Image (spheres, grey):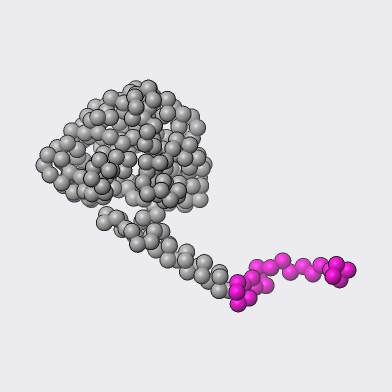
Amino acid sequence: MSKKKMTILDFQKYKDEGKKFTYVTAYDYTMASIVNDSETEVILVGDSLGMTMLGYTSTVPVTMEDMIHHIRPVVKGAPNTFIVGDMPFGSYNESPQQAIANVNRLMKATMCDCVKMEGGVEMAETIGAVVTSGTPVMAHIGLTPQTVTSLGGFRVQGGTPESAKKLLDDALTLQDAGVFSIVLECVPNNVGKLLRDKCKVPILGIGAGPHVDCQVLVLQDMLGMYGDFKPKFVKQFAQLRRDMVQALNQFHSESLDGSFPSEEYCFNKEVVLDKLY
């Protein structure tokens, strides 16, 4: 299958036409190439790589160097897929000047298509400065992993009229600041619908119900590559961890009983070795 890569303008076009699309994470060349072969339109190289790839307990320790290291191979592996590069914690929250400098560095080093930045009203000035400097920004509100401790942990956001209004205010302010789309994470279904209806830019939902403009999932979650932990909003479309463990166990077993490698997996040319013994 050959697909045409989305552009920034397509995000708005899809929203205006009521055409939904999908969006997943990837952190390396191989997984990116698999997504590129699928119909999924967007890849996020997210700072969630801190947990999925680096074994951290949160996204906070992830550095600019980590992000650049992982975004580069994803861009190479998925030339027909729109690539979003995540700005890690501490790379843009000091000042607009810091944000612009780090965004410029990330874009030049990776050639991704845009950056994603967390934060609502409080980050709008900084995000607006980045947009004005020439880089497209995808915003991220709701459950924001970089500041999850200040939100009381991994919990549903917008669960009261007051907090739902705060999310709407965040979204409209970010829209005014110039973002071309907004990731909305872990909110009730009707809050997702409210933001979709009230915002001109597309709302990209992860755990935000069925009414948003785009569905987002972490690839390792949806493919069943983790162990016991599964967020409530994740449907596992495959059980690759189970299949991978079974394959490894079969490799182990066949290697020990001698059935692997069989003749078809060997180089069978006879070399005269008598004088070498």
Magenta region, main secondary structure:
loop
Per the image, is 256 magenta? yes
Q: 155 or 169, which lies in front?
A: 155
Outermost residue toward the left?
161
Based on the picture, tell me whether residue 158 belongs to the magenta stretch: no
Look at 37% across and 33% down and name the residue there: 90
Which segment did they paint magenta?
255-277
Q: Taking 189 as reference, is 12 left or right? A: right
Instruction: Inspect this view and state whether residue 163 appears.
Output: yes
Residue at screen point 15% across, 46% down = 159
> Residue 56: x percent and y percent?
41, 48
Q: Is residue 25 above or below residue 127?
A: below
**Residue 202 can be seen in this image:** no
Of 71 and 157, the residue lying toward us: 157
Q: Is residue 184 left or right of residue 269?
A: left
Total number of numbered discs in the rendering: 0
Image point 18% across, 33% down: which residue? 169
Residue 47 locus on image (x, y percent)? 39, 42
Q: Quadrant of the C terminus?
A: bottom right
* Residue 177 to residue 113: above or below: above
Q: Position of residue 150 (x, y in %)?
A: 25, 40
Q: Which residue is pictured at 19% across the width and 38% down the height?
A: 167
Instruction: Answer with the quarter of the image where residue 212 lies.
Output: top left
Q: Is residue 41 above or below residue 228?
A: above
Q: Position of residue 61 (x, y in %)?
A: 40, 41
Occupied quadrant, residue 10: top left
In the image, 125: left or right of 133?
left
Tell me: residue 229, above or below residue 256: above
Q: Residue furthest bottom?
A: 257
